[in-house]
Amino acid sequence: MKAFLFSLLLANAVPLCAAEMPVPGFTGATRPQLKAVSLREARFRNVVEQKTDFSCGAAALATMLSYAYGLDAPEEVVLQGMMQGADSQAVQRLGFSMLDMKRYVEALGFRSKGYQMSAAALPNLKVPVITLLDTNGYKHFVVLRKATADRVFVADPSVGNREMRMDEFLPQWSGVLLAVVGQGYRVDNPLVRITPRLSARSAVDAAQPVPVAELIEFGFRHSDFF
């Protein structure tokens, strides 16, 4: 009896991984297939997942390079590049710093710009940036994708995409941001394409690509786009 019930459960179980499913309501020999996406895949869409406890900085930077610039930048490649010239034991104990990231991206030909920003100015961000959170003593790099008056959207290398309340985010936030700028930046990149739970008008505005002129204040040059 137990074996029968177990078989029945397996037969009716919902898959947690991606799968191809036929779309009902179509006739003919060819039926369109709808790809089912697992919860994990959805969480880590356009986010490079960190593979070690100390590599959140490398994974956050890999996320920026991969999805804001369209580069082939897996975490292990960025990790190896950032480890060059670094104290490996210190990195494994303390993790990377923003200075390590700055050196790495500048060696690739990019420019980096650090900011000290107030909470009130966060909704004015036009580009994804790397920032540091401190959660009960655990310091962790994430990509800050966008902010509104009461919400913050981050690409977190450890748990994937997160939507946080502003009052939840601010106590953890260091107030420091690192922008990676240079040629190849995709204005309509997936890190800035967010549909927050706002009014219809605000949602439309949030989905529009940022004009090049508004990116200059973040360290970009006109020559980066032309």
Image: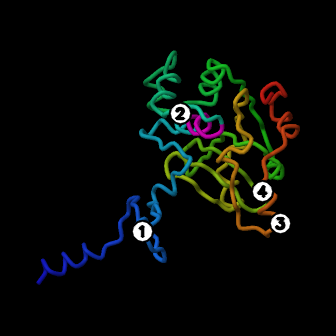
Residue at mark 4: 206
For residue 124, the mark is: none
For residue 22, the mark is: 1
Q: Nearer the viewer, mark 4 or mark 2?
A: 4
Q: Nearer the viewer, mark 2 or mark 3?
A: 3
The residue under label 1 is which amino acid type?
Pro
Which one is in front, 29 or 220?
Answer: 29
Gap in angstroms between the C-alphas marked 3 and 4? 9 Å
Which of disc 3 and disc 2 is earlier in sequence? 2
Q: Residue at x 47, y 41 (%)?
A: 50
Is 150 situated above or below 75?
Answer: below
Residue at mark 3: 201
Classify mark 2: helix, strand or loop.
Answer: helix
The residue under label 4 is which amino acid type?
Ala
First to last magenta residue range: 61-68
Label 4 Cα neighbours within 10 Å, binned few <14 / some 14-19 / many ≥20: some
